[in-house]
């Protein structure tokens, strides 16, 4: 057993070559690979941390937006409710106003119809009253209605003849106004009575289609008249009273 | 009985007798380099490591951890040297189990060459680390009286390393050869198993001692505690 120095030198050379080869093909690739992988892991961890921060920021922003949206949604719902309530109130007020207007129009229409009916009834009543009176006078007293009216007016003039003469003043004219022309007999009777009571005053006859049936005598500022207005007014009052009673009877059940 | 492969001449190259020690060393070197090249040929940081690469990484990180534990720094050049020592001796001793294969470490020439390498590497690393003056100053510490003892100690370290490795590897081979004559089929198996264990331990001790010597030579003056006692 001895040391072969040639072998020793060769083994030293072999060992140095092996050191270089392992450094080249083992240690450096492995250690560099580990370092690179650690750097890669560090980089990815940093990226993951950055991504986590971004995700957290995005989450916070999302939560804020969601909160804002919910708040906006509540405001929008409240606004919509308020607007719908306003619109509903407006529509109701408009409908109510229209209804009231229609009711008023309907009442006006009813009032017009009532007035029209009343006027027609009044005219019919007047005509009927005149015809009945005229027929009753002819049958009972063999006298015309116009002559009876003239006599009635003359009878009312007689007590106030002097006052009428004074009221005539300077006009010296009396005007007898009727709706229809007076018959000649009635005019002659009227002329005779006026001449008898007011000799200084002449009498003139006029017609007025708007005037109620009867006779109106004007002497200056004074006036004496007999028309069927008072009767028709009384007739209207009676009629209205009956109509009101009939209307209430429709509204309220009979017997109450 | 053939105790050293130095005497086995495999072939002659230009008048130089290439013995089995050198050829077997080349085989061990080829295995180490070939396996390393095969595993580390396609290393990319974005590709996950396979099991072979992971095995190599574990081995390398283990060596690096042991060396860093001794030197207290991560000097790669120490690792290249001591790690290669460990891998070479460990694989050589492992190949003891191959019939007909004489491990290069069973040659006193190989162990002497490795010890010589450590002997040279210690001053080289020391000078590279702190300069010539700092290295030479370690010979007169703690006083100039210690100069001859330090020089003797420096050389005796290399000689003890060489003889320790050779003795351990060869003792296994000698004991196996003796027991082979007593009980040819049983004892050699046990001895080979023990030889594997002692071979790995010797590889570890040799590499660690080399690292300790190098680290003691490269230690900073403020950190003399890094010097360790010889465990042998």
Image (cartoon, coloured by chain):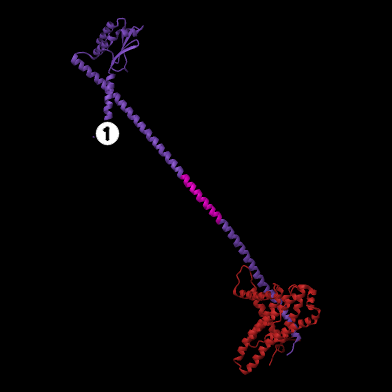
Residue under the image location 21 percent in, 13 percent down: A143
Note whether B188 is above or below A213 in the view shown.
below
Residue A121 position in % (x across, y down) = 27, 24
- A140 and B134: which is toward the camera: B134
What segment carries the magenta color?
A59-80
Residue A36 occupies quadrant: bottom right
Helix, strand or loop for disc 1:
helix
Q: What predominant SS class does the magenta segment belong to?
A: helix
Q: Which residue is outermost to the right?
A: B144
Vertical side of B93 occupied by A178: above or below: above
| Image position, residue A62 (x, y; %) | 54, 54
The answer to which quarter of the image holds residue B213 is bottom right
The chain displayed purple equals A
Q: Chain B is drawn in which colour?
A: red
> Which residue is at the far bottom?
B182
Q: Is there any visible trace of residue A214 in the rendered image? A: no
Is residue A254 positioned above or below A181 on the image?
Answer: below
Identified at 59% across, 59% down, the residue is A53
Magenta residue check for A137? no
Q: Name the residue under label 1.
A: A250
Residue at the image position 56 percent from the left and 54 percent from the top:
A61
Q: Residue A64 appears at what percent x and percent y?
A: 54, 53
Quarter of the N terminus of chain A within the rendering: bottom right
């Amino acid at each position: 057993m001895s040391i072969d120095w040639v072998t020793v030198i060769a083994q030293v050379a072999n060992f140095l070559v092996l050191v270089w080869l392992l450094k080249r093909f083992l240690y450096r690739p492995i250690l560099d690979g580990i370092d690179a992988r650690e750097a890669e892991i560090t980089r990815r961890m940093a990226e993951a941390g950055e991504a986590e921060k971004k995700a957290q920021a995005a989450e916070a922003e999302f939560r804020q937006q969601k909160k804002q949206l919910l708040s906006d949604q509540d405001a929008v719902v409240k606004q919509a409710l308020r607007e719908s309530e306003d619109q509903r109130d407006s529509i109701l007020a408009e409908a109510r106003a229209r209804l009231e207007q229609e009711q008023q129009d309907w009442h006006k229409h009813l009032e017009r119809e009532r007035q029209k009916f009343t006027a027609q009834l009044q005219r019919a009543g007047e005509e009927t009253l005149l015809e009945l009176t005229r027929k009753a006078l002819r049958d009972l007293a063999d006298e015309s209605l116009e002559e009876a009216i003239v006599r009635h007016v003359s009878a009312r003039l007689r007590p106030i003849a002097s006052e009428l003469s004074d009221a005539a003043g300077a006009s010296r004219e009396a005007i007898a106004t009727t709706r229809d022309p007076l018959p000649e007999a009635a005019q002659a009777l009227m002329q005779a009575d006026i001449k008898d009571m007011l000799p200084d005053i002449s009498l003139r006859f006029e017609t007025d289609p708007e005037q109620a049936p009867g006779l109106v005598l004007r002497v200056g500022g004074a006036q004496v008249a007999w028309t069927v207005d008072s009767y028709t007014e009384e007739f209207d009052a009676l009629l209205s009273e009956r109509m009101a009673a009939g209307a209430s009877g429709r509204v309220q059940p009979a017997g109450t | 009985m053939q105790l050293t492969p130095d005497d086995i001449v495999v072939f002659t190259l230009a008048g130089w007798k290439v013995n089995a020690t050198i050829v077997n060393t080349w085989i061990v070197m080829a295995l180490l380099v070939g396996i390393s090249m095969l595993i580390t040929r396609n290393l990319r940081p974005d590709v996950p490591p396979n099991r072979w690469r992971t095995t190599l990484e574990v081995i390398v990180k283990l060596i690096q951890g042991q060396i860093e534990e001794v030197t207290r720094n991560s000097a790669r050049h120490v690792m290249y040297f001591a790690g290669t020592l460990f891998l070479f001796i460990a694989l050589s001793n492992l190949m003891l189990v191959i019939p007909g294969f004489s491990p290069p470490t069973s040659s006193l020439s190989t162990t002497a060459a490795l010890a010589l390498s450590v002997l040279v590497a210690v001053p080289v690393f020391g000078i590279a680390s702190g300069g010539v003056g700092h290295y030479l100053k370690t010979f007169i510490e703690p006083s100039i009286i210690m100069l001859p003892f330090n020089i003797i100690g420096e050389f005796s370290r290399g000689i003890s390393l060489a003889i320790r490795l050779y003795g351990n590897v060869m003792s296994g081979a000698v004991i196996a050869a003796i027991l082979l004559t007593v009980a040819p089929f049983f004892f050699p198996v046990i001895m080979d198993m023990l030889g594997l264990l002692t071979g790995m331990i010797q590889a570890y001790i040799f590499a660690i001692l080399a690292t300790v010597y190098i680290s003691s030579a490269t230690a900073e003056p403020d950190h003399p505690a890094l010097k360790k006692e010889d465990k042998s």
